[in-house]
Structure formats: C-alpha cells, structure tokens
Amino acid sequence: MNVVALSASPHKGGNSETLLDHVISGLKDGKASVEKIRTHELDIAPCSGCGACETEGKCCIRDDFQNLRDTLTACDGIIFASPLFFMNVPARGKAVIDRCQVFWIAKHRLGIDLFNGRRRFGMLISCSGARYGPGGSDIFRGIEDTMTYVFDSLGLEKLDSLLFRRFDKPGEIRKNPEALKQARETGIRLAEWGDTSIPGF
C-alpha cells in the first residue's frame, strides 16, 4: 500500500507532525510505503478562482501542486496532519486544500473518476492548544468539516481522526507516551486497511 503523509505544521517536529511520524512508523512496520510531504516546503500559490479547471480539468497555475496532484491521485491513502490556527489549517496547508478544487470539479462537474474506482482512505491528525472552541463548542469542528469535504473530493473514505487537546508548545506531545503509542498502533492497523475485519476501520 502506498500512503501519502501530509504535514501542514510550520514546525518541524511539532505536535501534529510528531504524531504523524509515529503513524508513519507503524505503517512502515506493517510494510506500507509512505511518502511524507511538508506543505511548508512546497511552492504552492493560492487558488485564484479563475475557473480554468472547470473546462480543462486541471489547474493552470504552474508550481509544486502539479506534482502533488499526481501523487495524491496515485496513492492508496492520505493522512493529513495539522495544528489548529484559528480553528482550522495553517495558510500553506490551506493553499494545498484550496487547490484541490481541481479534484472537486473532476468529480462533481466533469464526472471524471480520477481514481478508477479504487477504494482509498483519508485520515486527519490534529492537535489543539485549547480544550474547547468558542462558547464551549468542539474545538475541532472547523477542521473536521473542512477535511471531510476535502477527502470526499479526493475520493477517500474518511476514517476516525486522531485528535488531541491541550498540547500547545511545539513538541509537547512527546511527553505523552500514550498518545504516541496510540499513533503508532494506528499506523500498524492502517497498514492492513481494506481488511473489513480490522476494528475501527
């Protein structure tokens, strides 16, 4: 199985990226192939809303998204790890998400199956410095809604998210061995994804 692990954290070794690395470790132990990509190391411009993808079926902006688009199309699963910035994804990660409009257009406007009917998965990993959102709301509501929509556009079956509250300082998650263990065990189970007998998947 070929998995793409996207880190939207601006911090190398930050909390969400540390969790992602432990999931990757579990995946590799299960003999899955994993490509890790940091969105902050990509040259990806914001979507300009030009509408070219509605007629051409592809984005007309020439930057790193061209290769990323092919990578996201070919893989068997995508793990998206992100901290919360104002209840959602940091700007460079959000630029990647907005450029995924090309996938939405292909599916919902042009009727193109870019994935040849393959069953694929998507998983969100996120850390929040706060416990609750405004008025006591779910702190992860915004990013969960965003990624549910993104995963649908990418033809992915959204699996249960790994969400952790009250980890604010970069790398603080390393002091929680239970969280790291949960992440690694999730990776091990993901390596066998597609077997419907796996609990939770």
Image (spheres, helix red, strand yellow):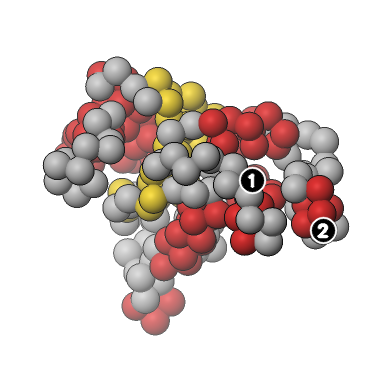
Whether residue 104 is visible: no
Under tag 2, what secondary structure? loop
Q: What residue type is labelled 1?
A: Val
Residue 56 lies, in percent from the top left, at 81, 48
Neighbourhood count class around disc 1 (C-alpha, 10 Å): few under 14, some 14–19, many 20 upward: many
Q: What residue type is labelled 2?
A: Gly
Seen at 34% across and 37% down, the residue is 19
Sequence-wise first label, 2 or 1: 2
| Numbered circle sitting on residue 51 | 2
Above or below, 127 against 137 in this view is above
Depth order, front residue of 107/147: 107
Residue 18 lies, in percent from the top left, at 37, 33
Mark-to-mark CA distance, 2 and 1: 17 Å
Seen at 28% across and 36% down, the residue is 193
| Numbered circle sitting on residue 96 | 1
Seen at 32% across and 50% down, the residue is 159
Under tag 1, what secondary structure? helix
Seen at 16% across and 41% down, the residue is 198
Above or below, 126 against 39 in this view is below
Task: Specify the quadrant of the image occupied by residue 165.
Answer: bottom left
Task: Specify the quadrant of the image occupied by residue 24.
Answer: top left
Above or below, 28 against 49 in this view is above
Residue 118 lies, in percent from the top left, at 44, 39
Q: Do the residues labelled 2 and 1 touch (CB within 8 Å)?
A: no
Residue 10 lies, in percent from the top left, at 56, 39
Image side of residue 72 versus residue 200, left or right? right
